[in-house]
Image (tube, rainbow, N blue to C red):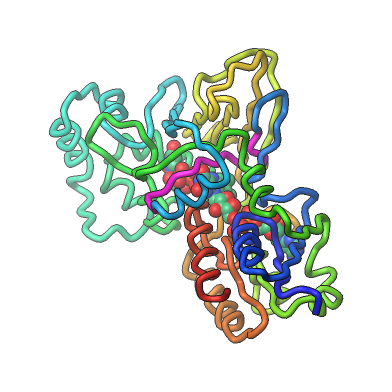
């Protein structure tokens, strides 16, 4: 065996594991099917602007050890995510906070906003929200739900809000203060110079083979290492033998515009159903860029089918049961360790992916 570990995937999970293993004297080979490293956090520089090719990535965490870990590989700027929601000609601040309610109803105090919300849901009698619609209504009332949640969510997930789990909407903060910070976390920022550089540093000194699909070269690659760390799709590893796990995919329509500032904010969500994209990202605003041109990406959400990029796992009951069946198989493997967002069929933020890779290192290395 030439290697101790074959690492499938050069995203954050694979790269953190590779780095820690190499530091402990392990011999590692990383294989990556794309023509670049860094997985979905990949950024590329175009005319001085860091373009987030697989969707906007804002680093945020409350885990001090993860924050200190990433700061070894990059300097982070002071970016705070404060998206704007656009419903027809009306503009609102996100997440849902006093600025949103004040614009929606002309109220000034938390009590006034709470009274309006209570009045809008009084007749609904929701004690235990059973789905996303009930959860959203019980948190923010009917106006905010109809204007800022319903259309966006149905575009994003391609499903009726009554057929979606309540927890999706609980990811968003709800505050009765005038605070537009989208996240509640203690630490936040964008790495100066982009995310790809972080992954380059993590992989320094490790052999990486790009454009190499593990599943297409399994026989040869399996014979090269004692153990395998696999960060691809768990169902694909098993050739979908128990069934296909569902995902949502996203198509990014990216263009460069001959103007300095297109929308004045990094993220603008389009919450009405009739506009086909969910949001527009203007990449330069993540880094307070002053370049003469600007690059924007419109995001179109779609149902994933084989061959598409998998983005958001659809963690409903049916898919969870299927994932559990794959997980049981995975646990019985003695040479293969599954990790990362695709290996565990979870929507994991970057900090959780890094924390779980470091946790694996503690157990394994
Ligand atoms: P990935 O980055 O997906 O890496 C897996 C790698 O494995 C890929 O490069 C893939 O090509 C490779 N691979 C798969 N199969 C094979 C194979 N058979 N052979 C070889 N290589 C293979 N997190 C945040 O913290 N903040 C955000 O703002 C944020 N925004 C997001 C926006 C979107 C649209 C999405 C989808 C996710 C976002 N995330 C965000 C989550 C973040 O992208 C993930 O936490 C992180 O990228 C996961 O890293 P990973 O290594 O697990 O997976
Ligand atoms: N959401 C919404 N309106 C918005 C933004 C978000 O209804 O303007 C809902 C939507 O259901 C989405 C969920 O909140 O799936 C979580 O939003 P988040 O911004 O975390 O989604 P992501 O950035 O992961 O796409």
Question: Looking at the image, is 207 positioned above or below residue 124?
Answer: below
**Magenta region, residue range:** 51-63
> Is 47 inside the magenta-drawn segment?
no
Looking at the picture, how far across and down is residue 95, in whole percent? 36, 37
- The answer to whether residue 158 of the structure is visible from this angle is no
**Which quadrant does ligand 1 occupy?**
bottom right
Q: Which percent across, then down, holds residue 110?
A: 17, 33
On screen, residue 134 versus residue 221, left or right, reads: left
Report the quarter where the C terminus lies. Answer: bottom right
As drawn, 161 above or below 355: above
Left or right of 264 on screen, residue 143: left
> Where residue 294 appears, x then y in whole percent?
65, 20
Q: Is residue 73 left or right of residue 213?
A: left
Residue at x 68% of width, y 71% of height: 26
Visible in this render: residue 39? Answer: yes
Residue in the foreground of this view, choosing between 152 and 186? 186
Verify whether residue 59 appears in magenta: yes
Quarter occupied by the N terminus: bottom right
Q: Give above or below for 233 relative to 37.
A: below
């Amino acid at each position: 065996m030439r290697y101790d570990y074959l690492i499938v995937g050069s995203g954050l999970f694979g790269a953190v594991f590779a780095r820690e293993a190499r530091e402990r004297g392990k011999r590692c080979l990383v294989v990556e099917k794309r023509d670049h490293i860094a997985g979905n956090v990949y950024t590329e520089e175009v005319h001085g602007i860091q373009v987030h090719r697989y969707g906007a990535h804002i680093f945020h965490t409350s885990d001090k050890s993860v924050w200190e870990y990433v700061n070894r590989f990059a300097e982070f700027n002071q970016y705070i995510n404060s998206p704007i929601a656009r419903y027809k000609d009306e503009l609102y601040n996100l997440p849902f906070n006093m600025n949103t309610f004040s614009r929606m109803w002309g109220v000034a105090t938390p009590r006034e906003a709470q009274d309006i919300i209570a009045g809008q849901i009084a007749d609904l009698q929701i004690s235990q929200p059973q789905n996303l619609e009930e959860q959203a209504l019980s948190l923010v009332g009917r106006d905010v739900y109809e204007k800022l949640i319903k259309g966006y969510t149905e575009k994003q997930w391609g499903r009726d809000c009554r057929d979606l789990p309540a927890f999706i909407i609980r990811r968003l903060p709800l505050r009765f203060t005038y605070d537009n910070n989208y996240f509640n976390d203690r630490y936040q920022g964008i790495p100066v110079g982009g995310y790809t550089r972080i992954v380059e540093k993590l992989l320094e000194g490790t052999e990486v083979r790009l454009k190499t699909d593990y599943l297409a070269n399994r026989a040869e690659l399996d014979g090269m290492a004692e153990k395998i760390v696999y960060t691809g799709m768990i169902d694909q590893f098993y050739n979908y033998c128990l069934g296909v796990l569902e995902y949502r995919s996203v198509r990014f329509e990216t263009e460069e515009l001959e103007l300095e500032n297109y929308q004045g904010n990094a993220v603008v969500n389009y919450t009405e159903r009739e506009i086909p994209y969910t949001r527009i990202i203007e990449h330069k605003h993540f880094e307070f860029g002053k370049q003469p041109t600007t690059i924007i990406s419109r995001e179109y959400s779609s149902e994933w089918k084989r061959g598409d990029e998998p983005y958001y796992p659809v963690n409903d009951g049916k898919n969870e049961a299927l994932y559990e069946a794959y997980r049981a198989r995975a646990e019985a493997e003695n040479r293969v360790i599954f990790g990362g967002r695709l290996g565990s069929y979870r929507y994991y933020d970057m900090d959780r992916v890094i924390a779980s890779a470091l946790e694996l290192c503690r157990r394994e290395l």
